Structure formats: C-alpha cells, structure tokens
Amino acid sequence: MSMIRSVLRGMGHALPTRVVENAEFEEWIDTSDAWIKSRSGIERRHFAADGQTTSDLATDAARAALEDAGMTAETVDAIIVATSTPDTTFPSVATFVQGNLGMKTGFAFDVQAVCAGFVFALSNADAMIKSGQAKRVLVIGAETFSRIMNWEDRSTCVLFGDGAGAVVLEAGEGDGTAQDAGILATDLNSDGSYRDLLYVDGGVSKTQTTGVLVMQGKEVFRHAVDKLAKTAEAALEKAGLSDADVDWVVPHQANLRIIKATATKMNVPMDRVVVTVQDHGNTSAASIPLALSVAKAEGKFAPGQLLVMEAIGGGLAWGAVVLRL
Ligand code: ACO
C-alpha cells in the first residue's frame, strides 16, 4: 500500500574554527590527555569563538545541507532546530535560522530533548511530513555547550564541544514496506524521575541565570548502556527489521565506551558504526547530524543502506530512528 515517507535528501555540518586538544585542559585542571582518551575516546573538540552563536552554526549547517540536496531555502516548508543552548531565551534558534536564510514563508521552532534532541526533532518532522503539514523540512541539531560548562569540574568540562549538523527531509512515496527509502520507524522515551542525573543548574524561571551543566557521569553511563540498544531494537522491530539488517549505526557521540557497548549488545561490528567522538567530543543534539554529514563526506554511505540513529541525554530522554537512504 503506498504511503508517504520522509526521505533524506541532503546533509551538512558546521564546526567552529577553534580546535581544543585534550592537552589544553592540562594547563588549568588536574587531568591528562591519556585519562580523557581512555575514559571517553575524545581527543579534541571545537569551541565557538566569542560572539559566535548556536544559530550561526545552525545556519551554516543548514546552508550546507540545502546545497547537498540541490535545494533553495524558499522551497522549505519548516525548520526544526534541536538545541539546549539557544542564542536567547526566545525567540527560537529556528526563527534566527529562518531569518538568516531569508525565508519569509513556512514555520520554524525548536525542540529540546538535550542529547536526544535530534532524534526527537526527526520524529516530529516525520510526523508532520506524513500528516501533510509539510513537504520539505530542515532538521538541525546545533549547540554551543562550551557556554554552559563549569570549567572547574574536570569530570564534565573535558567532554563537550560545539557544532551543528543539518538534514533535509522531503516527502516521497513508498510502498509501505521496510524496503522503502526514508524514515521507517521511530521510538521515543523519557523518564523525568531521572532528571537530577544530568541537568543545568540555572534557568529563566528558577534562577534567572544560565547555569552550568551538572552530571552524575557514572549513572548516566549505566542508563545509556542499558537503554540505547533497547530503543534501537524497538525502532527496528516497529519497522519489521532486526539488528542483522543494519548497515550503519549512527549513535549519539558521548563516549566511545558507550558506543562500543551498545554496538556489542546489538551484535553490530564497530566497522559499521559511525564514530566521530574523537574529533568533536559530545556536541549534544548536534552529534548525530554532524556524524551523518562527516560519514557522508567520507563516502561511507550508499543508496538503499539502512541506518539506525540512537541517543540518550538529560531528562532522561532517549530514542532511535530507523532510516533507509
Ligand atoms: N581527568 C582525570 N581524572 C578525572 C577526570 C578528568 N577529566 N574526571 C574525573 N576524574 C576522576 C574522578 O574524580 C574519579 O576519581 P576518584 O576515583 O578518585 O573519585 C576517577 O577519575 C574515575 O571517575 P569515574 O566517574 O569513575 O570515571 P568513568 O570511567 O565513569 O568516566 C565519564 C567518567 C567519562 C564522565 C563517564 O561516566 C561518562 O561518559 N558518562 C556518560 C556521559 C554521557 O554519556 N552523557 C550523555 C548525555 S550528555 C547530555 O545529555 C547533555
């Protein structure tokens, strides 16, 4: 039976110019390149320049994705930005991007599910495309986590980075089978009873400050390993597929040990897992679209391949998207 599918037409990314190697942290906190690498897999990350905002990075990533898709901004119906580090409290980063792209039509809004934000945004875009609300949607993950770091907390400040990634989704027609191109299934979850495991200790309503990130790393790690393979497998099952059908896992890039443990649970060998955490650190909602765009630029993907994206972050919120190229 024919049905509307959200087909991936283009990918792009943007990174700040400034690269910060692990060794730089040794200058002001008690840490080492060896510790950071062995515990997280991270070797370097990018930090935004003074005055460079989340929407600047998001706009550059959006332009790259539109160019990759061979499309112009005025043909896009909607922009969804996943971010926890907006330029301002309001309006949304998505409307900044819309303005920067010169779009006078369509609609734009942000989604906030911390590191799982891109997966939640993709799922929203898919629902809007399937319901006929939009035909072309720019879905962007963009962050400047360097703005919410506690630079004296060595257990968090070495882990995060800044960047943006974007994709263009377009309505296409499929047969309603797992062989269709486009998003085949999504799986979203959250459990607010875990909100104290990972949070920012400030905000508009509570403190009228921005605050800094606080994380119980070990606990988050434990939940990540438990929940990521489960959500990926739940999404695959909804699509009528299994681990064995997966060509590429594109995981949230938080920690190489989490990525490896999840791949092991899914029985997917590491040569079919996209890994960029060594170069970007954890860029929260930007990490999956960044990884997608880098993998595409490296020539990793082929038409018809099956991708599984999975992520977990503050909330806790977690989820997965199954997509065929
Ligand atoms: N350099 C040197 N030593 C350090 C550092 C550092 N940068 N940070 C912590 N340590 C020390 C700790 O103080 C501790 O010392 P102690 O035993 O004397 O107390 C020791 O190293 C071991 O610390 P652990 O917390 O046990 O280290 P672990 O192996 O668990 O790794 C890490 C910590 C990397 C934070 C890990 O727990 C992790 O990756 N957690 C998950 C993070 C994550 O995935 N977040 C995802 C979502 S993020 C989002 O949604 C925004």
Image (cartoon, rainbow, N blue to C red):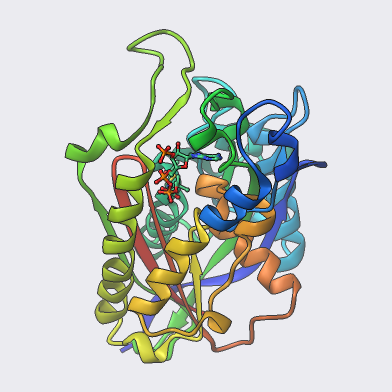
Dividing the picture into quarters, in which one does residue 214 lie? Answer: top left
Query: Residue at the spot x=74%, y=66% of the render?
Result: 68
Image location of residue 219, percent across then percent down: 29, 46
Q: Nearer the viewer, residue 138 or 35?
A: 35
How many marks do you count on the picture? 0
Q: Nearer the viewer, residue 166 or 280?
A: 280
Above-or-below relation of 249 to 258: below
Image location of residue 177, percent across then percent down: 35, 89
Dividing the picture into quarters, in which one does residue 261 lie? Answer: bottom left
**Which quadrant of the rendered structure holds the N terminus?**
bottom left
Is 58 on the left-hand or right-hand side of 203? right
Residue sitting farthest toward the right: 17
Above-or-below relation of 96 to 12: above
Query: Residue at the spot x=27%, y=32% of the render?
Result: 196
Q: Nearer the viewer, residue 181 or 40?
A: 40
Image location of residue 115, percent across then percent down: 44, 47
User: Which image quarter has ligand 1?
Assistant: top left
Residue sitting farthest toward the top: 208
